[in-house]
Image (cartoon, grey):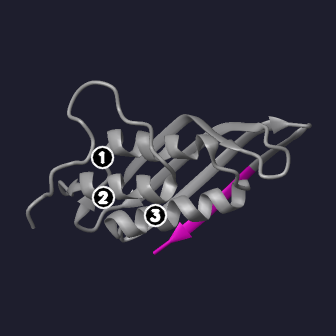
């Protein structure tokens, strides 16, 4: 299957994504043929979203572990995709589920586990896991 030209520039600053729905298209467009690996783990330690109740920022991390089928995620497009949540109001549980669904949309992995960790705020840390496949 021929690879479409990426909507992201090859060099220079990356464009700010409009929203997660638009940014998931980067994941799909930049996916590349799986090179015969069994497991891929990506860890994003500087994840930010917005609390939908207070409007305050929530900081944390995202761990994505998957078994590729035919395609793999490209890390640059994943950075842009995760950046799209910076102004998105969502609960941690919803974030884990949406990220998992968007990755399934983009690469259709055999198995996928997405873990979203929100840092302590108000004395409570939160961890949500979504599994697909």
- What residue would you read off at disc 1? 74
The magenta segment: 127-133
- Image mark for residue 95: none
Q: Residues within 10 Å of mark 1 (few under 14, many from 20)?
A: some
Discs 2/3, front: 3
Determine the CA span between mark 2 and mark 1: 16 Å
- Which SS class for mark 3? helix
Report the side of 53 relative to 97 (left or right). Answer: right
Asked which secondary structure carries label 2, the reply is loop
Circle number at residue 102: 3
Q: Earlier in the sequence, mark 2 or mark 3?
A: 2
Give the class, few, some or many, for how many residues have Cα within 10 Å of label 2's Cα (few <14, many ≥20): few
- Front residue of 50/117: it is 50
Percent x, y of residue 120: 81, 36
The secondary structure making up most of the magenta span is: strand
Position of 65 compared to 117: left or right?
A: left
Tell me which residue sits at (60%, 53%) in the image: 115
Looking at the image, residue 77 sits to the left or right of residue 16; the answer is left
Residue 55's place in the image compared with 39, above or below, is above
Percent of width and height locating residue 127: 72, 51
Looking at the image, the residue that sits furthest to the left is 2
Q: Residues within 10 Å of mark 3 (few under 14, many from 20)?
A: some
Is residue 70 positioned above or below 78 on the image? below
Work out which residue is located at the far top of the displayed protein and give it.
12
Query: Where is mark 2, residue-wise?
Result: 38
Q: Quadrant of the C terminus?
A: bottom left
Which badge, 1 or 3, comes first in the chain's sequence?
Answer: 1
Q: Residue at x 58, y 46 (%)?
A: 85
Q: Is residue 34 magenta?
A: no
The location of residue 112, given as percent across then percent down, is 46, 64
């Amino acid at each position: 299957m021929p690879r479409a030209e990426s909507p992201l520039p090859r060099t220079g600053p990356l464009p700010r994504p409009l929203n997660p729905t638009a940014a998931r298209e980067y994941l799909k467009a930049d996916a590349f043929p799986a090179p015969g690996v069994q497991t891929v783990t990506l860890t994003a330690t500087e994840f930010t979203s917005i609390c939908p109740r207070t409007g305050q920022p929530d900081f944390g991390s995202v761990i994505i572990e998957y078994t590729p089928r035919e395609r793999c995620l490209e890390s640059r497009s994943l950075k842009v995709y995760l950046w799209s949540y910076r102004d998105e109001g969502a609960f941690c549980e919803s974030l884990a589920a949406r990220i998992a669904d968007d990755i399934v949309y983009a690469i259709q992995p055999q198995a996928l586990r997405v873990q979203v960790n929100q840092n302590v705020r108000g004395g409570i840390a939160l961890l949500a896991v979504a599994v697909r496949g």
